[in-house]
Amino acid sequence: MKGLRMLTLLFAICLISFLLIKNSPIDPIQAYVGADMIKVSPEQREKIAEYWGLDQPVMVQFFSWLSALLSGDLGTSMIFRRPVSEIIGERFWNSLVLMLTAWILSGVIGFVMGVVSAMKKDTWIDRIIKWYCYTLASTPTFWMGLLMLIVFAVWLGWFPIGLGVPTGVLAEDVTLADRLQHLILPAMTLSILGVANVALHTRQKLIDVLASDYVLFARARGERGFLLFWRHGLRNVALPAITLQFAAFSELFGGAVLAEQVFSYPGLGQATVEAGLRGDVPLLLGLVLFSTIFVFAGNLIADMIYYVVDPRTRESRTI
């Protein structure tokens, strides 16, 4: 059932994305030729359109791409002049490192903040954490990225302004420390914005646990503070927080698109923006396909965790 739902979702998203970019004011031939467009004659323009299949009806172009996809060919990028699969393969590892770092940091920091807020309920610490989370929930990613650049790259000069590696350095001379230095600011941007949901969810869940009868009994026996949380709260709030993190893959990927654009980070997000702005249909459809599978995998993992952790889910399915 999930496989059929996945195939239907992929087809619908690819079709909608294809129609949107085909009806956009962007001229793919002009984007392909670039600044030399004024030197291109009408005959050369027709040959370019014929080479890329742009002279065919829209639905013919879509089903031609779909038939090539079923044979394992994602097509060739019009702006990079390389196979789409190669571009996605190269950019994916950069994005994966960025998103995985931000995903772990936001999960850990958000969980700790939620626990502290619940344990210090109705104190000034709790109010500060809630204010912080509600503020972040309404903060745009690109604005936070620009703020991080201004403070830490321009004013303080602690980190480079952008890119994934230093400029003017050969690929074989780039060290791991260089890559990490360029990774810190975009990862911090995504992780700072990603803590809100986990923190607020963990806080509310732990407050409910602390108000339960067995915790009140544990308090009567003299258990307090960290020992009380370790014995009775951790197991009840950790797994729901992890599940929530897996379900947030779509927000993480969407935030990475904006963060990579702000920091000129060479990942899937920046490639998606370039493909959309320059009308590169094969690359854009390949990226849409890949990102949909990525988000669907995160939601599937979240559902599986719910199924394993919550017995009520299994009972409802058997009924």
Image (cartoon, rainbow, N blue to C red):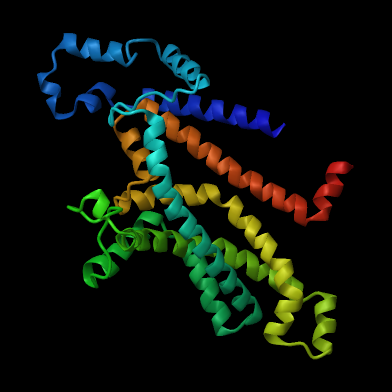
Quarter of the figure that contains the C terminus = top right
Which residue is drawn at the image coordinates 63% and 64% (left, top)?
Answer: 201
Circle count? 0
In this view, 183 is above or below 129: above
Give the residue at x 38% y 41%.
90
Horizontal side of 308 relative to 260 (left or right) equals right
Kindly give the residue lying farthest to the left in the view shown.
39
Q: Residue furthest front?
A: 172
Image spot of residue 121 (x, y percent): 64, 80
- Residue found at the very far bottom of the displayed protein: 222
Residue 235 pos. (x, y %): 73, 68
Residue positioned 60% across, 78% down in the render: 116
Q: Quadrant of residue 75?
A: top left
Up/down of 241 relative to 79, above or below = below
- Give the left or right position of residue 262, taking residue 45 as reference: right
Residue 161 locus on image (x, y percent): 25, 60
> Camera-side residue: 181 or 51?
181
Asked if residue 316 lies left or right of residue 136, the reply is right
Which quadrant, please, contains the N terminus?
top right
Foreground of the two, 140 or 227: 227
Left or right? Give the position of 314 relative to 120.
right
Query: Which x, y percent locates residue 239?
Result: 69, 62
Q: Residue at x 62, y 46 (%)?
A: 299
